[in-house]
Amino acid sequence: EVQLLESGGGLVQPGGSLRLSCAASGFTFSNYAMSWVRQAPGKGLEWVSTISGGTAFTYYADFVKGRFTISRDNSKNTVYLQMNSLRVEDTALYYCAKGTPGYNYGTFDYWGQGTLVTVSS
Amino acid sequence: QSLLTQPPSASGTPGQRVTISCSGSSSNIGSNTVNWYQQLPGTAPKLLIYSSNQRPSGVPDRFSGSKSGTSASLAISGLQSEDEADYYCATWDDSLVVFGGGTKLTVL
């Protein structure tokens, strides 16, 4: 059974940093692209970043370029999102999502339950 | 402002057929397949349709997807109360994943 378990969210001041983790199980982690998608309170889904399987190419939404870094540790079956220079507008529930091989990177077949990031002074 | 445009709301009565549209451009829907996600209240999104018209295992055949040119549609037939949820389209666009703004479906 595929499981994605996010952690690392919390309350941080504007300008601060957080590192989110997503521990995966139930599939051969290294073979799959992994992504982070966020949802601000009462708002829609917003893609944040994707890291491919294999060669680990990375992709970012324009609003996080230069501030967030996605990475993966295949030995730990974990994907990370390092978030720096956090802004109030980064407040959201951050979901980890598993990619579907053979289909475009917007195809997420499994999602975690999310970890809440609150940026406030 | 999302690159994919969805109506903010839709509604129907039990048993009806409803459709939700997703309008894009040549760089996203026009060049890639479309995925649809269902988000029930208080839960994580779930893949409903992938590759424009394919259903993952376990998704009822009441749900169907289609794509034509730079637009896509999700159709739900035999509407049920448990279909009340938010629905999102998504695809790839020149090194970015793009989501529609979401459509809130109300079952009257």
Image (spheres, coloured by chain):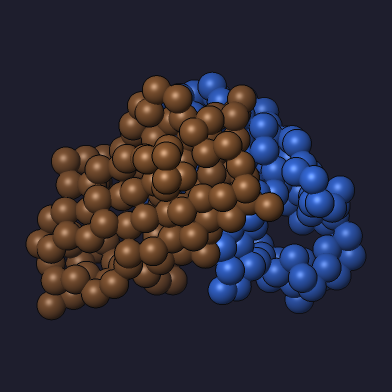
Chain colours: A brown, B blue
Out of A4 and A77, give the one closest to the viewer.
A77
Out of B16 and B76, give the one closest to the viewer.
B76
Expressed as whole percent of the image width and height from the top left, the position of residue A61 reads: 31, 41
For residue A88, side relative to residue B13 (left or right): left
The reply to whether residue B30 is in sight is: yes
Expressed as whole percent of the image width and height from the top left, the position of residue B51 reads: 67, 32
> Which residue is pictured at 40% across the width and 60% down the height?
A94
The reply to whether residue B91 is in sight is: no
Q: Residue furthest left?
A: A15
Quadrant of residue A41 in the image? bottom left
Quadrant of residue B54 in the image? top right
> Which residue is pictured at 54% across the width and 44% down the height?
A98
Above or below B38: residue B84? below
> Which residue is pictured at 52% across the width and 64% down the height?
A113
Expressed as whole percent of the image width and height from the top left, the position of residue A3 reads: 58, 55
Above or below B37: residue A89? below
Out of A80 and A65, give the one closest to the viewer.
A80
Expressed as whole percent of the image width and height from the top left, the position of residue B23 reads: 55, 39
Q: Residue furthest front?
A: A75
For residue B6, side relative to residue B14 (left or right): left
Which quadrant: the C terminus of chain A? bottom left
> Which residue is pictured at 46% across the width and 53% down the height?
A23
